Image (cartoon, rainbow, N blue to C red):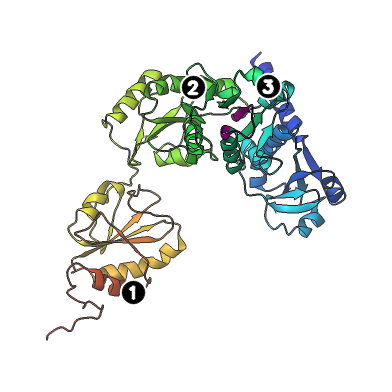
Amino acid sequence: MRCLAAAVLIFGYIATTLAAESDVLDLGDDNFASTLKQQETTLVMFYAPWCGHCKRLKPEYAKAAELVKDDDPPIKLAKVDCTEAGKETCSKYSVSGYPTLKIFRQDEVSQDYSGPREAIGIAKYMRAQVGPASKNVRSVEELAKFLDTKETSIFGSFEDIDSKLAKIFLKFADKNREKYRFGHSSDEEVLKKNGETDKIVLIRAPHLSNKFEASTIKFEGSTESDLTTFIKENYHGLVGHRTQETSRDFQNPLITAYYSVDYQKNPKGTNYWRNRVLKVAKEFAGQISFAISSKDDFQHELNEYGYDFVGDKPIVLARDAKNLKYSLKDEFSVENLQDFVEKLLADELEPYVKSEPVPESNDTPVKVAVAKNFDDLVINNGKDTLIEFYAPWCGHCKKLTPIYEELAEKLQDEDVVIVKMDATANDVPPEFNVRGFPTLFWLPKDSKNNPVSYNGGREVDDFIKYIAKEATTELKSFDRDGRPKKTEL
């Protein structure tokens, strides 16, 4: 029976996937222009079957095509195989990498696609490219169709489309057309059904509705600024679905539960755990934000906390207002999560720090810092310090290594410490803005709270001149211009 049930599930998934893929136009050299001439707006994916990125995008692309297939104004999604039937077309449009996505107005390129790569994000982005920012709903039937969606929507009911509230709504919609889904109506029957003549409401996506918060929230403000705040505070609800596309919407302090979040294949299982997080989040509304995230989409974040694997139950991770990291060590449960949040807010938890082991000896000219000894070796050493943040795989870092070692040897007897730290294996303190490798900072011994980014040359003489000039106390072996001092015989 289990095998039969599994087979049914697999067959259902395959059938759903194939149905969605059927909504994507399959184009080649022989029908590309003629087919696109019949469409108002088409997103075209130029791909190669062997391309890994294309394979990952394909199911999301198919889902997006299904989402927009009944849209008005119409939107179509198409694909072109650049290795077979579409070679000439791909060459014509200078496709040099895969996947390449372009937006066409009939058979003319309008622009390159620079939007999200997941289904709902693709649908939102494309809907923003056609027609007005807000869908004008002209009947109760159109309202039912508008509300039959998997997305959160913002809807305005206005007896007078020229009213102050309507103008605020339409202006906001125009500014945010690529981010949110909007609709409005002045139809008498629609207004009657909605119960009020002038209002703006946020309507949560059906799969996100729950017993802990209202599915529809009314805007009570009076300005565009009020509306911006209202959407920001309410769009994701008590426990938002945090994806790669929406991650920037979630600000610290933030608690995130990572597990098999999948609203396409397993909405019931996804909400089973989300509802338990909601039960706790309800108690701390306004104090801290909560979210759920797919463990597969955010494996890099799990790695930052030392997790290589997530089992059946969620892993709960947090960042406070200072961006310090914390993790729920106990097995996930409502009670354990409640206790974790209370202790986090009371500042009773020890932050998690990713660190290599402290070196057993550190007597080489270039000192090795790790997260666990960073304060002792860098901040509290009582000396001017130059620190390099590097990555083991970085070619520029490897080139700098012998130069950095020679510099350290020349300054061994000075009141200066030369330090390096592997920024891929250790947490970097937030005051050091490391975005590439190698990144270097100068820390004067009396001002360690204000690291100075080093942007000078990368030769030994360049470093000597800089340190000689910036050193708190003049160097013993070099003058302030970096010239070697003469020694008395």
Q: Name the residue carrying label 1.
A: 462
Q: Is residue 276 visible?
A: yes
Q: What's drawn in magenta, residue-wise?
A: 151-165
Image x and y of residue 87, in percent: 80, 55
Q: Residue at x 48, y 30 (%)?
A: 221
Badge 1: how crowded within 10 Å, few (<14), some, or many (20+)? Answer: few
Image quarter in which the C terminus is found? bottom left
Q: Amino acid at mark 3?
A: Val
Q: Residue at x 33, y 67 (%)?
A: 404
Q: Amino acid at mark 1?
A: Asp
Q: Which mark is residue 190?
A: 3
How far apart marks 1 and 2 lie (CA) works out to 56 Å
* Residue depth check, mark 3 versus mark 1: number of the one nearer the observer: 3
Image x and y of residue 475, in percent: 19, 73
* Residue depth check, mark 3 versus mark 2: number of the one nearer the observer: 3
Q: Name the residue carrying label 2.
A: 273
- Disc nearer the start of the sequence (3/2): 3
Image x and y of residue 234, in percent: 49, 29
Q: Is residue 163 magenta?
A: yes
Q: Secondary structure at mark 1?
A: helix
Up/down of 169 relative to 53, above or below: above
Q: Amino acid at mark 2?
A: Trp
- Residue 73 falls left or right of residue 473: right
Up/down of 487 relative to 236, above or below: below
Q: Residue at x 66, y 41 (%)?
A: 128
Q: Are marks 3 and 1 in contact (CB under 8 Å)?
A: no
Q: Is residue 7 visible?
A: no
Badge 3: how crowded within 10 Å, few (<14), some, or many (20+)? Answer: many
How far apart marks 3 and 2 lie (CA) works out to 36 Å
- Disc nearer the start of the sequence (3/1): 3
Q: Which mark is residue 315?
A: none
